[in-house]
Image (spheres, grey):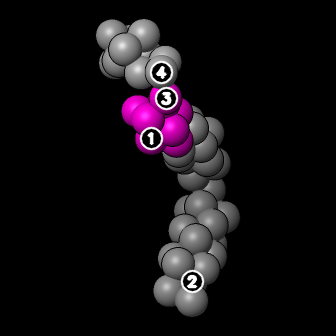
Amino acid sequence: MARQSLVKEFFLFIMHEKKWWLVPLILVLLIVGALMLFASSSPLAPFIYPLF
């Protein structure tokens, strides 16, 4: 429940303050984080780590 309210509050903040540039920034950070999380346990990890 708390997570839903946090996401809702974040989007309300973006809409109220007109800070639409934050949306792509957050999405890219989430994608990079997911890539690092999933790639750390795969055989591709040694090839991905030098990129970061």
Secondary structure category for the residue under label 3: loop
Label 1 CA crowd tier, 10 Å (few <14, some 14–19, many 20+): few
Task: Choose mark 3 or mark 2, whichever is in front.
Answer: 3
Q: Which mark is residue 37?
A: 1
Rounded to the nearest angstrom, the CA distance separating label 1 from label 4 is 13 Å
Q: Earlier in the sequence, mark 1 or mark 4?
A: 1
Magenta-tinted stretch = 34-42
Secondary structure category for the residue under label 1: helix
Which kind of residue does numbered mark 1 sit on? Leu
Rounded to the nearest angstrom, the CA distance separating label 2 from label 4 is 37 Å
Q: Earlier in the sequence, mark 3 or mark 2?
A: 2
3 with respect to 36 (left or right): right
Q: Which residue is mark 4?
A: 43
Q: Earlier in the sequence, mark 2 or mark 1?
A: 2
Which kind of residue does numbered mark 3 sit on? Ser
Q: Which residue is mark 2?
A: 5
How far across and how far down the image is residue 36, in percent?
Answer: 44, 34
Secondary structure category for the residue under label 4: loop
How far across and how far down the image is residue 5, in percent?
Answer: 57, 83
Label 2 CA crowd tier, 10 Å (few <14, some 14–19, many 20+): few
Task: Choose mark 2 or mark 4, whichever is in front.
Answer: 4
Q: Which residue is mark 3?
A: 42
For the N terminus, give its image quadrant.
bottom right
What residue do we see at 37% from left, 14% from top? 46
Which kind of residue does numbered mark 2 sit on? Ser
